């Protein structure tokens, strides 16, 4: 177990980052090499101009307005989950640096920063986690059950695992931001630093599950985040 923890702490992160960015680049390259469809699949009426088509595609992607018309309940679950994920990703910037400009603008000390981070992080984590259980339960009933494949359950359980280990650190530990900064700065400079003790054992599990997600991402269904923009642009071309 100690060897596995060491690998996920100091070795596998480099592999995960390389596979994530390399896999995405390769995926986009493969998409770009595909032969154009012999028929047009344009929407009508389509936005005019390349910028108008891109803007309409981005609005469609971020609001999921097409899904809202088809299945409002699924839209609510998906939209809230993606919104929570966005907030979680923004909050995780503090693992590498900090919002110094914001704290200075608001004239907040460490106590105010900690309180805001605790409240905002808990809200963001809740928005992200609760819809995951709804999406998982949805896979066990009705026609969706027969259309589901093992990959669908793997992704949901992986995301739930990441969320719950994150909640463990958020609610049961008092994580020192400075320790996280030193740890990730050490990884970036190849001058390894000790694992943040304040985060507890959940940190290794959380970090390992995120790396598994990064390796899976370019080659699985979650890459629709990138592909949806391209497909929506094709539909508006």
Image (cartoon, helix red, strand yellow):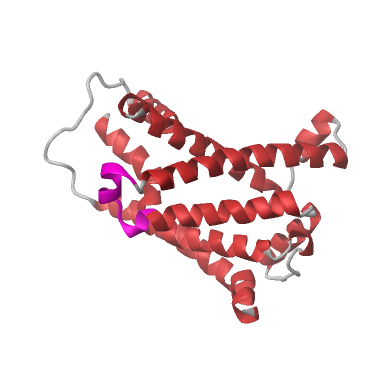
Q: Quarter-wise, where is residue 194 in the image?
A: bottom right
Q: Nearer the viewer, residue 204 or 225?
A: 204
Residue extending farthest to the front is 141
Instruction: Please provide the residue range marked out in magenta.
Output: 141-152
Q: Residue at x 65, y 37 (%)?
A: 123
**Vertical relation: 37 (above or below) 1:** above
Q: Residue at x 65, y 50 (%)?
A: 167
In the image, taking residue 92 as reference, residue 44 lies left or right, namely: left
In the image, taking residue 86 as reference, residue 229 lies left or right, namely: left
Tell me, yes or no, whether the highlighted magenta stretch contains residue 150: yes
Tell me, yes or no, whether the highlighted magenta stretch contains residue 134: no
Q: Nearer the viewer, residue 134 or 175?
A: 134
Q: Residue at x 26, y 49 (%)?
A: 147
Whether residue 96 appears in this view of the structure is no
Q: Residue at x 67, y 41 (%)?
A: 122
Q: Position of residue 95 (x, y in %)?
A: 70, 52
**Vertical relation: 42 (above or below) 219:** above
Task: Provide the major secondary structure of the magenta segment.
Answer: helix
Q: Quarter-wise, where is residue 36 in the image?
A: top left
Q: Nearer the viewer, residue 82 or 229?
A: 82
**Vertical relation: 132 (above or below) 21:** above
Q: Quadrant of the C terminus?
A: top left
Q: Position of residue 12 (x, y in %)?
A: 56, 70
In the image, taking residue 212 as reference, residue 34 lies left or right, namely: left
Q: Position of residue 17 (x, y in %)?
A: 53, 62
Whether residue 234 appears in this view of the structure is yes
In the image, taking residue 88 as reference, residue 154 lies left or right, namely: left
Q: Quarter-wise, where is residue 85 in the image?
A: top right
Q: Position of residue 124 (x, y in %)?
A: 62, 39
Q: Quadrant of the N terminus?
A: bottom right
């Amino acid at each position: 177990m100690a060897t596995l923890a060491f690998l996920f702490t100091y070795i596998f992160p480099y592999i995960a980052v390389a596979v994530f960015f390399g896999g995405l680049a390769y995926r986009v390259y493969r998409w770009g090499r595909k032969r154009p469809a012999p028929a047009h699949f344009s929407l009508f009426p389509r936005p005019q101009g390349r910028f108008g088509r891109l803007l309409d595609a981005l609005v469609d992607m971020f609001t999921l307005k097409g899904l809202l018309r088809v299945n409002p309940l699924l839209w609510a679950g998906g939209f809230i989950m993606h919104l929570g994920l966005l907030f979680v990703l923004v909050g995780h910037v503090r693992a590498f640096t900090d919002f110094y400009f914001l704290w200075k603008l608001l004239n907040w000390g460490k106590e105010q920063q900690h309180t805001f981070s605790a409240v905002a992080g808990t809200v963001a984590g809740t928005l992200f986690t609760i819809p995951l259980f709804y999406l998982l339960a949805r896979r066990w009933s009705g026609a969706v059950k027969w259309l589901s494949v093992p990959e669908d359950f793997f992704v949901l359980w992986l995301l739930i695992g990441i969320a719950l280990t994150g909640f463990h650190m958020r609610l049961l530990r008092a994580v020192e931001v400075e320790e996280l900064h030193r740890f990730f700065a050490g990884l970036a400079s190849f001058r390894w630093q000790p694992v943040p003790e304040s985060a507890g054992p959940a940190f290794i599990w959380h970090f390992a599950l995120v790396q598994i997600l990064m390796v899976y991402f370019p080659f699985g269904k979650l890459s629709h985040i990138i592909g949806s923009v391209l497909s929506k642009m094709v539909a508006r071309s």
